[in-house]
């Protein structure tokens, strides 16, 4: 079974403002590189599609307590407040920049800075959502059952994760990282995000807790204007750890190399646009109504 290993960890960046972001929890662990909310939000509508489909599929008509793990800039949190306006909604993220944006976007929710790996709910949550965040964490064999145990009886765990390591977008990042100019700086990244578990493995991990368990994969075809936009799409996600680890003077050349390869791999369609295929895995687990 393949493991996720998160090699590009860094130590905590200070919270932008603990007062604004709420109290910081489980701060003792390492954290990944801080994300840029502004950049991430430049594709907000497209990125929100999967979150919307995940949340639409949740079968709960009411929820008192909802946690958004890896809430980012609040794109997923805002959908949660629309669907369950009366719930106490808590967003958790380790990026201060993302949390500042989330606080602005969803003033009614409560935000906490922390590492998902160390998340323990103060009380069982009717719904735990993790949209496009868990693929950054290692050891899903332990993590997923642990999260399920934080869900109240009859509640749901709803997860969506990109499954794109084998897509040209990601294979090309790795290929550029192995060029002599960059390899010495990027050794640590070689295994930073490994393949997800298989659907069967997720099923076996979660079914002992579940009343019902749905797993599916959707291949999104995001229409972008060209290679430049593909690079921009990943600059705030998959590409960012590579760029952050490079010395400043090598970043632009790395992006140019990557853009060149991307433009060869993603041929323009008849209207000049390119299609960025992005497979995403969905897990929707409803916890048993009774223990045992
Ligand atoms: C792709 S964004 C998704 C944000 C949001 N859920 C959405 O749907 O737009 C992933 C987020 O997960 C956060 N993240 C990644 N690993 C994390 C960890 N170990 N603990 C807390 N947050 C984490 C990142 O900081 C980032 O904001």
Image (tube, helix red, strand yellow):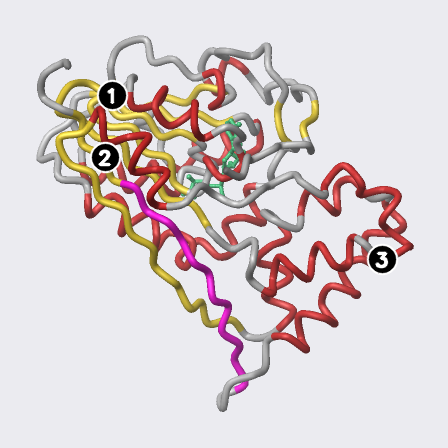
| Tag 2 and tag 1, C-beta contact below 8 Å | yes
- Residue 109 at what x, y percent from top left? 32, 26
The image position of residue 180, as x and y in percent, is 90, 55
Q: For mark 3, what is the residue?
A: 179
Residue interval drawn in magenta: 272-283
Disc 3/disc 1 C-alpha distance (Å): 45 Å
Q: CA distance from mark 2 to mark 3?
A: 42 Å
**Callout 1 secondary element:** strand
Q: CA distance from mark 2 to mark 1?
A: 10 Å
Could you tell me which quadrant the C terminus lies in? top left
Which residue corresponds to the image point at 60% horizontal and 55% vertical from the top-left?
234
User: Is residue 101 shown in magenta?
Assistant: no
First in sequence: mark 2 vs mark 3: 3
Q: Is residue 146 left or right of residue 248?
A: left
Location of residue 266 in the rendering, given as x and y in whole percent from the top left corner: 59, 76
Find disc 1 in the rendering and name its residue. 151
Query: Disc 2 on helix, strand or loop?
Result: strand
């Amino acid at each position: 079974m393949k493991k996720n290993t998160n090699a590009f960890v860094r130590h905590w960046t200070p919270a932008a403002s603990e007062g604004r972001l709420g109290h910081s929890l489980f701060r003792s662990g390492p954290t990944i590189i801080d994300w840029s909310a502004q950049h991430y939000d430049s594709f907000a509508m497209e990125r929100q599609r999967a979150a919307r489909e995940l949340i639409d599929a949740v079968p709960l008509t009411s929820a008192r307590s909802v946690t958004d793990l890896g809430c980012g800039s609040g794109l997923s949190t805002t959908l949660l407040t629309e669907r369950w306006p009366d719930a106490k909604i808590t967003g958790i993220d380790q990026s201060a920049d993302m949390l500042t944006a989330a606080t602005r976007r969803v003033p009614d929710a409560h935000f906490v800075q922390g590492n998902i790996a160390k998340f323990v709910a103060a009380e069982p949550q009717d719904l735990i959502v993790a949209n496009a965040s868990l693929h950054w964490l290692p050891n899903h064999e332990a993590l997923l059952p642990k999260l399920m145990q934080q869900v109240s009886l009859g509640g749901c765990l709803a997860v969506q994760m990109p499954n794109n390591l084998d897509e040209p977008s990601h294979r090309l990042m790795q290929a550029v990282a192995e060029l002599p100019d960059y390899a010495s700086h990027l050794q640590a990244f070689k295994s930073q995000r490994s393949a997800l578990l298989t659907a069967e493995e997720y099923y076996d991990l979660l079914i002992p807790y579940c009343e019902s368990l749905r797993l599916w994969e959707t291949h999104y075809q995001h229409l972008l204007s060209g290679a430049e936009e593909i690079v921009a799409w990943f600059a705030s996600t998959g590409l960012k750890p590579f760029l952050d680890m490079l010395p400043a003077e090598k970043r632009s050349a790395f992006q140019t190399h990557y853009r060149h390869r991307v433009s060869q791999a993603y041929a323009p369609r008849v209207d000049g646009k390119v299609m960025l295929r992005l497979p995403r895995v969905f897990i929707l687990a409803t916890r048993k109504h009774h223990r045992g």
